[in-house]
Amino acid sequence: MRHIQQFAAKLILVALLSGCATQAVRAPLPGEPVADEISLLRGNFVPGTQPDGNTVLLRGRGGLVVVDTGRHAAHAARIIEAARASGQPVAAIVNTHWHLDHVAGNAALREAFPQLQVHASEAIDQALHGFLADYRVQLQALVAKPGNATPAAVAGWRGEIARIDTGAQLRPTQPVRASGSFSPGGRRLRLGLERNAVSGGDVWLFDPATRTLVAGDLVTLPVPLFDTACSGGWQEALGRLDGIGFARLVPGHGAVMDHAQFGVYRGAFDRLLACAEGDASADACKAGWLHDAQSLIPPQDVALADPLLDYYITHVLRADPVRRGKYCHKEPHE
């Protein structure tokens, strides 16, 4: 009888241990795998539509960290669906910068997960009273006099106005004012801050455990996006990123790259700026970027790169000194 009781006790113990093991198995993290417990929800960036930036999901013991939330409602819905499929709540959002294609989904995520914290620079405050306020005025004028615009275009303009008007929901709850470590959801991460590069307050995230760097729009494909950038400060920021011991980098737009590919990007960036500062034709500078970054740009994205380069070379990189220096300041990087 004693042997039967001992055997039964062992069976109970095995069942309990098996149950614990089963409970420890977590649902796969949705999206494109990047590294251990890190995935990518790729943003759309196609001609004729406003883009969504990339979203990165990182899983910790107590919840998910979401880096950037896209522009459109459909992209935010993908993030919420992915979080629920993972079996964990969103513990934190990290916004790499204030451009609408990286921050507009904050409102939907904050409604779905009211306890989450938003970590971002305070550059959005100036943008809401400056760049985004001016953009809203332009959108209102288009809506008031749409001309031959299609109903879809007018709806798009109204959507942009609505996104800007969620301003309070776009701001950080935990402002990033300096570089440092933090552990949202139980995952130890490092945040960096660049004040003089793409947006006046660019936050990057580094996961030491997997050597994964999430760079936001400090790295973008198929071209660098200079709309609110200080090109010289951005160039210096890329040099600092190069000194981080990352194995892989997730850009704000485009595919994941390794450190060697980032070196290709940085070299192409340097040569683009040098060309724009020289006497070569805009076509020559454009051809130089497309050649230098060819290995990073999918063939189907060349059609998008071409008009963007035309615009940035002519109207930004070769604009008058006031326009070129509009977004530059002398504050040191963090």
Image (spheres, helix red, strand yellow):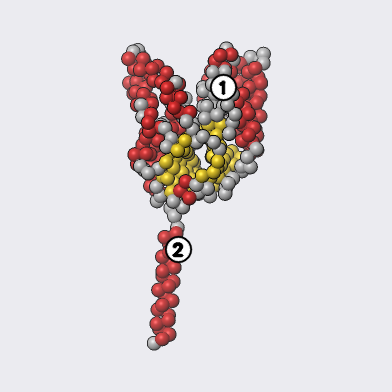
Where in the figure is residue 257, as x and y percent of width and height?
A: 59, 38
Label 2 belongs to which residue? 21
Which element is circle 1 on?
Answer: loop
Indicate which disc residue 221 carries: none
Residue 329 figure quarter = top right
The reply to whether discs 1 and 2 touch (Cβ–Cβ < 8 Å) is no
| 38, above or below 333, in the image | below
Q: Is residue 70 left or right of residue 280?
A: left
Q: Residue farthest to the bottom?
A: 1
Residue 81 figure quarter = top left
Residue at 48% x, 50% y is 186
Q: Is residue 74 visible?
A: no
The residue carrying pointer 2 sits among few (fewer than 14), some (14 to 19) or many (20 or more) residues within 10 Å by Cα, namely few
Q: Is residue 334 visible?
A: yes
Seen from the viewer's position, the closer of residues 32 and 217 is: 217
Label 1 belongs to which residue? 328
Where in the figure is residue 1, as x and y percent of width and height?
A: 39, 87
Where in the figure is residue 54, as x and y percent of width and height?
A: 48, 35
**Label 1, label 2: how many angstroms apart (C-alpha)?**
54 Å
The three-letter amino acid code for the residue at tag 2 is Ala
Tell me which label, 1 or 2, sits earlier in the chain.
Answer: 2
Seen from the viewer's position, the closer of residues 178 and 232 is: 178
Residue at 47% x, 30% y is 122
Seen from the viewer's position, the closer of residues 326 and 332 is: 332
Seen from the viewer's position, the closer of residues 217 and 118 is: 118
